[in-house]
Image (cartoon, rainbow, N blue to C red):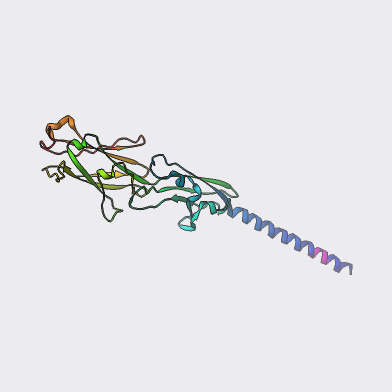
Amino acid sequence: MKMKNYLKILSSVVLLASLGSCSNEEGKESVSEQGSIMVDLSTDLSYSRSVDKSAYQNVNNYKVSLYKGEEPVYTDRLYEDLELEQSVDFGVPYTLTAYYGEDVAAGYDKLYVKGSETFTVSQGDKKTISIVCKPANARMIVVYDGKFEDYFQNCTVSIMTSYMDEAWEMDKADAGQELYLKTGDKGVQATLTFALTDKNGDPVSVDGFETSKVVDLKPCYSYTLTIKPDETEIQGGKLGLDIIVDDGVTEEDVTVDIPGDYIPS
């Protein structure tokens, strides 16, 4: 009888030890396979002026997507709906992307803002992923110099990129408006075409007049097209078209020359 009780006690001890061992192993496995992240979102809208900044500065308006490698964990969740702490697998590359606005080919006041970060988390680590969302398209403004109307009535600028189905036109009536152009992450080439009319409203057609230029547009760059007569060489009939890049970026100049004595003295 005593022997039976002894065997029962021994069996119970062994069973408990086994269960404890399994529990420890499961705990270790859980710790080893998981980390966690918190998302910290902010914005930098340095070159945007006419758009309603309040909507863009409110990070709760932003949508967030998380990818594990190429596989989506979740997509297009509002930032305000995210869990404060999210579990992720350690040692695996993740990409977190946040954005706000319309990613259209072209449009007035269509600022598109985006930020992205690729990261990995160490075993059992808790990491804060900080993302700064910046303009992800290019801005273009057309400005007409005060002397322009002394010689011309209008200059229509047609803008075309590979993202557009048809060209976008800007002229004097659109001066100062902010046109936003899709560039993708690496930038895109834009073909600018110019059509001049004289003070009577008649189209200008001069042999050798260079009516088209190609400009490299980059995301988060602002371009100002200043159209002005180059009065330093009136006899040569030149019209200077300068593309000035804002925000301290190296200036990029494009000049359109009108040969002959077109500009009156």
Q: Which residues are magenta?
A: 7-11
| Residue 21: % across, % down | 70, 58
Measuring 36% from the left and 50% from the top, which residue is drawn there?
184
Magenta stretch, main secondary structure, is helix
| Residue 20: % across, % down | 72, 58
Horizontal side, residue 119 vs residue 184: left or right = right
Residue 210 appears anywhere in the view? no
Which residue extends farthest top?
232
> As rendered, which of 160 and 131 lies closer to the eye?
160
Which residue extends farthest front?
200
> As rendered, which of 184 and 13 lies closer to the eye?
184
Measuring 29% from the left and 44% from the top, which residue is drawn there?
216
Q: Across the whole image, how many numbered discs are drawn on residues?
A: 0
* Residue 124 inside the magenta-drawn segment: no
| Residue 246: % across, % down | 34, 37
> As rendered, which of 251 and 46 lies closer to the eye?
46
